Amino acid sequence: TTALDSNEEKGIPATAFFKELPTNNTAGPLCVPMIIVGGGTAAWSALEAIYEKNPTAQVLVVTEEPYAPYNRTPLSKEMWSIPSIAAANISKDTRAELEYKYHLPKQPESYRASIMSNVSVTRLVPSENKIELSNGMEIFYEKLLLATGGKPSVSELVNMSSLDPSIQQGIITYRGIADFERLYKSFVNPETRNITILGGGFLGSELACSLQTRLHQENNTKKQITLLCPEAGVLGKFLPRYLSDYITKQMKRYNIDVRPGVSVFDVVPSKSSEDMNEHSRLQLQLFGWKDNEHITDQVVIAVGITPRQELAEEAGLETDPVAGGIRVNAAMQVEGNIYAAGDVASFWDRALGRRRVEHWDHALVTGRIAGENMAGGNVTYDWESMFWCDLVGLNISFEATGIIDSSLRTVGVWTLKNSLRRGEFSDQVLNEGVVWYLRGNQVVGALLWNREGKGLDVARQIIGSKHQISSVQDLTNLIPIQSE
Ligand code: FAD
Ligand code: NAD
């Protein structure tokens, strides 16, 4: 019998089942044909694929966030520049616009699936096809997708549990809508004079630019945005040194207080005399900075994520000891009837080997493959996903595909121009370019600078064919760059 039949046997009608999902097990154990764990892009994409293949599919999504699955990418960019976000709450109109444009969460009713939000899956028992939930329920599945993404890393940086609650309040990590709403509240509070972002990766750099742009828009010179990163420059883990230096310089000129080469070793209440009457100010104790300390009102930790593989690990499923994450095959299958996709999946890339990717397009593509296969399809991964990064206000955006890692050898092909516009950067501006990343002589990654994605398909083909160069000159014309 199928899970659905067994529910019907228990008197739960198939058609009504999903909108009237029991919230406890008093009527006996619940069985569901397809369960998706997670409320991010991989979950969203899997749902789309499942319903395309089987419009009458019966799917349950369990997510610990209070929303239906949504896209996180506007949270470090557009959300800070939409004028109608005047209060900490996202207004109804804005929400409708964001749902449409960026698929921020739709109302659960508009999904065909049943969405169980504010509930975590606490245990997975593959031998019984069962999950256990934080609300005490047990649910049986026929097919399961783990789309659990990652959680922001903090532990090695700040031992949150040892901090006084008043200090904890001033420190946040940033991953979802609830974090946006919290940071927004702090940002608009006149008492917040400084916001300090720890980490110069994608999140830290995008957020710093978006917050500073908002301050410029409001002519607000009373607040300061600081970014501390251990690398020699912003995005230094990913970009060649000259490019990281260039962005760092542009951010400083944009009035962001960027401090490269700095690590934080403790956070304590501020004891400075000017703050004697304040309770919320924090003092960061620093390595690598001349004053060894920095006073702030709000800390945002953006030091990477840890894949949420604990359900799989405890269930004895295979995880990746190198890249982290849950190991899947090309069909996004972990084993038998269990699938994984998105940030949490360690997958086999035909051109680049086993790896894990923490970007939106990858979650979209792998979520789709998992969903289609769960609905009876037979598709495999044969693609190179892309990502984009927008530094709002600096007029810098880039797209990339493959491995983007500054420890690799890179070759850049550029056109340069002098910015003549008054009030803007006076020295040379990197106009348009391609940076190739090489492992030995093999092209393994490409970054397209200010090109609005033009050239991505060519880059994908080159990476996918394991293209070997015989000299650096080979790279100059692979993607034509317009000269000024
Ligand atoms: P997630 O989106 O992390 O979703 C995982 C979900 O699983 C969450 O809802 C979580 O609460 C839930 N969950 C985990 N464990 C459990 C459990 N046990 N029980 C129930 N629920 C659980 N990428 C780009 O390419 N370009 C960008 O511009 C970009 N901007 C970004 C901006 C921000 C602010 C952030 C945070 C990320 C950005 N990314 C961007 C990265 C991109 O958003 C991620 O790669 C993508 O969200 C991964 O999707 P996912 O579904 O795998 O995981
Ligand atoms: P990241 O991996 O992009 O960057 C991590 C950064 O953390 C490092 O570059 C470093 O500056 C910093 N760091 C690491 N250890 C540190 C320490 N001990 N002290 C101080 N700094 C330290 O991660 P993120 O920027 O936190 O972003 C979170 C996730 O969101 C990532 O998966 C990222 O890919 C994703 N994201 C992607 C985009 C995009 O693709 N445009 C935008 C925002 C977020």
Image (spheres, helix red, strand yellow):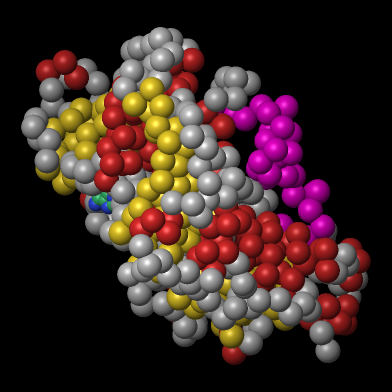
Comparing 52 with 428, the one in front is: 428
**x then y, percent, for residue 10:** 85, 79
Which quarter of the picture shows residue 453? top right
Which quarter of the picture shows residue 4? bottom right
Which residue is depicted at the point 43% across and 36% down? 415
Q: Is residue 219 left or right of residue 246?
A: right
Which residue is depicted at the point 62% across and 30% down? 90
- Magenta highlight range: 88-117
Which residue is depicted at the point 83% across and 69% down? 53
Looking at the rendered image, the quarter that the N terminus falls into is bottom right
**x then y, percent, for residue 363:** 59, 60
Comparing 57 with 379, the one in front is: 379
**x then y, percent, for residue 146:** 58, 70
Considering only vertical position in the picture, is 471 above or below 186?
Answer: below
Q: Is residue 454 left or right of residue 107?
A: left
Considering only vertical position in the picture, is 168 above or below 127?
Answer: above
Which residue is depicted at the point 50% across and 65% down? 463
Q: Is residue 98 magenta?
A: yes
